Image: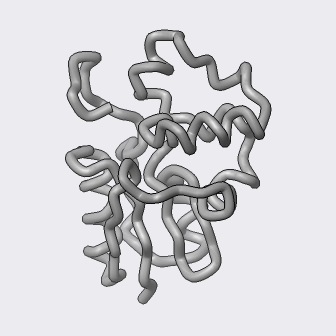
Amino acid sequence: MATIIFYEKPGCINNSQQKNLLIAAGHQVIAKNLLTEPWTTEHLLPFLQTHPVATWFNRAAPKVKSGEIIPEHFSAEQALALLLLDPLLIRRPLLQIENDHYLGFNPNQLATRIKFQQTTLDLETCQQTTACPHP
Protein backbone atom coordinates (compact mmCIF):
# COMPACT_ATOMS: atom_id res chain seq x y z
CA MET A 1 0.00 0.00 0.00
CA ALA A 2 1.03 3.59 -0.61
CA THR A 3 1.88 6.45 1.68
CA ILE A 4 -0.03 9.49 0.45
CA ILE A 5 0.66 13.06 1.51
CA PHE A 6 -2.76 14.67 1.30
CA TYR A 7 -2.96 18.48 1.31
CA GLU A 8 -6.46 19.42 2.37
CA LYS A 9 -8.58 22.19 3.75
CA PRO A 10 -9.52 21.02 7.25
CA GLY A 11 -13.28 20.80 7.59
CA CYS A 12 -13.88 20.18 3.88
CA ILE A 13 -16.45 17.40 3.56
CA ASN A 14 -15.14 16.27 0.17
CA ASN A 15 -11.55 16.07 1.41
CA SER A 16 -12.74 13.93 4.34
CA GLN A 17 -14.57 11.55 2.00
CA GLN A 18 -11.56 11.35 -0.32
CA LYS A 19 -9.22 10.52 2.57
CA ASN A 20 -11.67 7.89 3.86
CA LEU A 21 -11.67 6.13 0.48
CA LEU A 22 -7.89 5.98 0.49
CA ILE A 23 -7.65 4.84 4.11
CA ALA A 24 -10.32 2.16 3.56
CA ALA A 25 -8.15 0.78 0.77
CA GLY A 26 -5.29 0.37 3.25
CA HIS A 27 -3.19 3.37 2.27
CA GLN A 28 -1.41 5.52 4.84
CA VAL A 29 -2.70 9.07 4.49
CA ILE A 30 -0.67 11.90 5.96
CA ALA A 31 -3.00 14.88 6.03
CA LYS A 32 -1.53 18.37 5.85
CA ASN A 33 -3.26 21.72 5.96
CA LEU A 34 -3.15 23.23 2.48
CA LEU A 35 -3.83 26.70 3.89
CA THR A 36 -0.94 26.79 6.36
CA GLU A 37 1.67 24.86 4.37
CA PRO A 38 4.71 27.07 3.69
CA TRP A 39 4.36 26.92 -0.10
CA THR A 40 7.18 27.90 -2.40
CA THR A 41 7.32 27.80 -6.18
CA GLU A 42 9.50 24.68 -6.04
CA HIS A 43 7.09 22.93 -3.67
CA LEU A 44 3.81 23.84 -5.42
CA LEU A 45 4.76 23.71 -9.09
CA PRO A 46 5.08 19.88 -9.37
CA PHE A 47 1.36 19.57 -8.54
CA LEU A 48 0.38 22.12 -11.20
CA GLN A 49 2.78 22.05 -14.12
CA THR A 50 1.13 19.30 -16.21
CA HIS A 51 -2.32 20.92 -16.03
CA PRO A 52 -3.86 23.92 -17.79
CA VAL A 53 -3.47 27.06 -15.67
CA ALA A 54 -7.20 27.63 -15.24
CA THR A 55 -7.54 24.20 -13.57
CA TRP A 56 -5.09 25.20 -10.83
CA PHE A 57 -7.81 27.26 -9.13
CA ASN A 58 -10.39 26.21 -6.56
CA ARG A 59 -13.66 27.11 -8.29
CA ALA A 60 -15.42 27.27 -4.90
CA ALA A 61 -13.07 29.95 -3.54
CA PRO A 62 -15.02 33.13 -2.75
CA LYS A 63 -12.82 35.32 -4.98
CA VAL A 64 -13.35 32.95 -7.92
CA LYS A 65 -17.08 32.50 -7.34
CA SER A 66 -17.60 36.26 -7.09
CA GLY A 67 -15.76 36.89 -10.37
CA GLU A 68 -13.04 38.92 -8.67
CA ILE A 69 -10.58 36.32 -9.98
CA ILE A 70 -11.12 34.74 -13.38
CA PRO A 71 -8.69 31.79 -13.67
CA GLU A 72 -8.67 31.90 -17.48
CA HIS A 73 -7.15 35.40 -17.41
CA PHE A 74 -3.83 34.44 -15.82
CA SER A 75 -0.52 33.30 -17.22
CA ALA A 76 1.23 30.46 -15.41
CA GLU A 77 3.58 32.90 -13.69
CA GLN A 78 0.76 35.21 -12.57
CA ALA A 79 -1.39 32.31 -11.35
CA LEU A 80 1.46 30.73 -9.41
CA ALA A 81 2.25 34.02 -7.67
CA LEU A 82 -1.43 34.46 -6.75
CA LEU A 83 -1.76 30.90 -5.42
CA LEU A 84 1.34 31.33 -3.27
CA LEU A 85 -0.15 34.49 -1.76
CA ASP A 86 -3.61 32.99 -1.18
CA PRO A 87 -3.61 29.16 -0.80
CA LEU A 88 -7.43 29.15 -0.51
CA LEU A 89 -7.34 29.65 -4.29
CA ILE A 90 -5.48 26.33 -4.85
CA ARG A 91 -7.60 23.49 -6.21
CA ARG A 92 -7.66 20.67 -3.71
CA PRO A 93 -6.69 18.18 -2.67
CA LEU A 94 -3.06 18.03 -3.64
CA LEU A 95 -1.69 14.51 -3.33
CA GLN A 96 1.87 13.27 -3.37
CA ILE A 97 2.67 9.57 -3.74
CA GLU A 98 6.44 9.16 -3.71
CA ASN A 99 7.59 11.36 -6.63
CA ASP A 100 4.16 11.59 -8.26
CA HIS A 101 2.07 14.73 -7.74
CA TYR A 102 -1.68 15.09 -8.29
CA LEU A 103 -3.93 18.14 -8.53
CA GLY A 104 -7.50 17.49 -7.45
CA PHE A 105 -9.10 14.13 -6.78
CA ASN A 106 -9.35 12.35 -10.13
CA PRO A 107 -10.26 8.70 -9.39
CA ASN A 108 -9.34 7.50 -12.88
CA GLN A 109 -5.92 9.12 -12.72
CA LEU A 110 -5.25 7.87 -9.20
CA ALA A 111 -6.39 4.34 -10.07
CA THR A 112 -3.48 4.03 -12.50
CA ARG A 113 -1.13 4.49 -9.53
CA ILE A 114 -2.93 3.04 -6.47
CA LYS A 115 -5.83 0.75 -5.71
CA PHE A 116 -8.97 1.94 -3.94
CA GLN A 117 -12.72 1.42 -4.17
CA GLN A 118 -13.99 3.45 -7.10
CA THR A 119 -17.07 5.58 -6.59
CA THR A 120 -19.49 7.32 -8.91
CA LEU A 121 -19.88 10.18 -6.42
CA ASP A 122 -18.43 13.54 -7.38
CA LEU A 123 -15.88 13.97 -4.61
CA GLU A 124 -14.24 17.07 -6.03
CA THR A 125 -17.03 19.57 -6.65
CA CYS A 126 -18.10 21.35 -3.47
CA GLN A 127 -21.68 20.37 -2.69
CA GLN A 128 -22.14 23.12 -0.11
CA THR A 129 -24.25 26.22 -0.64
CA THR A 130 -22.80 29.65 -1.27
CA ALA A 131 -23.10 30.29 2.45
CA CYS A 132 -20.66 27.46 3.17
CA PRO A 133 -17.93 28.54 5.57
CA HIS A 134 -15.59 25.97 3.99
CA PRO A 135 -14.93 27.06 0.36
Q: Position of residue 54 (x, y in %)?
A: 67, 32
Q: Position of residue 4 (x, y in %)?
A: 43, 75
Q: Nearer the viewer, residue 95 or 17?
A: 95
Residue at 54% x, 66% y is 110
Q: Nearer the viewer, residue 84 or 133?
A: 84
Q: Position of residue 76 (x, y in %)?
A: 77, 38
Q: Is residue 133 above or below residue 80?
A: above
Residue at 44% x, 53% y is 93
Q: Position of residue 99 (x, y in %)?
A: 63, 79
Residue 69 as seen in the image, left or right of residue 45: left
Q: Quadrant of residue 25?
A: bottom left
Residue at 53% x, 54% y is 106
Residue 128 as seen in the image, left or right of residue 22: left
Residue 16 as seen in the image, left or right of residue 38: left
Q: Is residue 65 above or below residue 107?
A: above
Quadrant for the C terminus, please: top left
Quadrant for the N terminus, please: bottom left
How many marks on residues?
0
Q: Residue furthest top?
A: 67
Q: Nearer the viewer, residue 44 or 108?
A: 44
Residue at 53% x, 39% y is 85
Q: Quadrant of residue 129?
A: top left
Q: How is the image coloured?
A: one colour
